Image (cartoon, grey):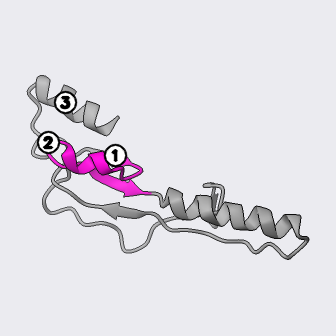
Amino acid sequence: MGRYTLKRLKQAGVVVPEDIAVTGYDNRGLAILADPELTSVDGKVNVMARTCAQLVIAAAESRDVPTLSTVPDLVVRASMVPDATPPATGPSFDPFGFPVGD
């Protein structure tokens, strides 16, 4: 979706990141192949999937299942304004991807 957005903006004469910043989600390997390289939120899907599997096994074995959270990373690349910096902390998500906390 992010790469498609970059392509359509370029066709419309919009210059990224000078005119607009674009950010994708999931931080797929294709983000670095975009022109410009796509800034992306890395939701750590692999970590969440592995953790979910471990929680299901623990629940099936009648063990205590802890409450867990992951913090996504913002991977800043050329599609974002040059002076933009990622936040020091981000929201927390439970193993199923739902926000937790305030």
Q: CA distance from mark 2 to mark 3?
A: 8 Å
Residue 68's image quarter?
Answer: bottom right
Q: Say whether residue 69 is left or right of residue 32.
A: right
What residue does disc 1 label?
24
Along the viewing direction, whichever of 49 and 96 lies nearer the viewer: 49
Q: Are marks 2 and 3 in contact (CB under 8 Å)?
A: no
Q: Residue at x 18, y 49 (%)?
A: 37
**Mark 2: secondary structure:** loop
**Mark 3: secondary structure:** helix
Q: Amino acid at mark 1?
A: Gly
Is 11 rendered above or below residue 83? above
Q: Amino acid at mark 2?
A: Asp
Give the residues drawn in magenta, as a range. Answer: 24-42
Q: Residue at x 81, y 70 (%)?
A: 58
Query: For the residue carrying disc 3, how many other residues have a C-alpha within 10 Å: few (<14), some (14-19), or many (20+)?
Result: some
Q: Are marks 2 and 1 in contact (CB under 8 Å)?
A: no
Along the viewing direction, whichever of 94 and 28 lies nearer the viewer: 28
Question: Upstream in the sequence, badge 2 or badge 3?
Answer: 3
| Residue 45, position as x, y percentages in the image | 52, 56
Along the viewing direction, whichever of 19 and 38 lies nearer the viewer: 38
| Residue 21, position as x, y percentages in the image | 21, 46
Q: Say whether residue 22 is left or right of residue 55.
A: left
| Residue 12, position as x, y percentages in the image | 13, 23
Q: CA distance from mark 2 to mark 1?
A: 13 Å
Is 28 colored magenta in this rendering?
Answer: yes
Is 53 rendered above or below residue 31? below
Q: Residue at x 15, y 53 (%)?
A: 78
Is 47 rendered above or below residue 16? below
| Residue 71, position as x, y percentages in the image | 50, 68
Q: Say whether residue 31 is left or right of residue 42.
A: left
Q: Residue at x 12, y 30 (%)?
A: 10
What residue does disc 3 label?
7
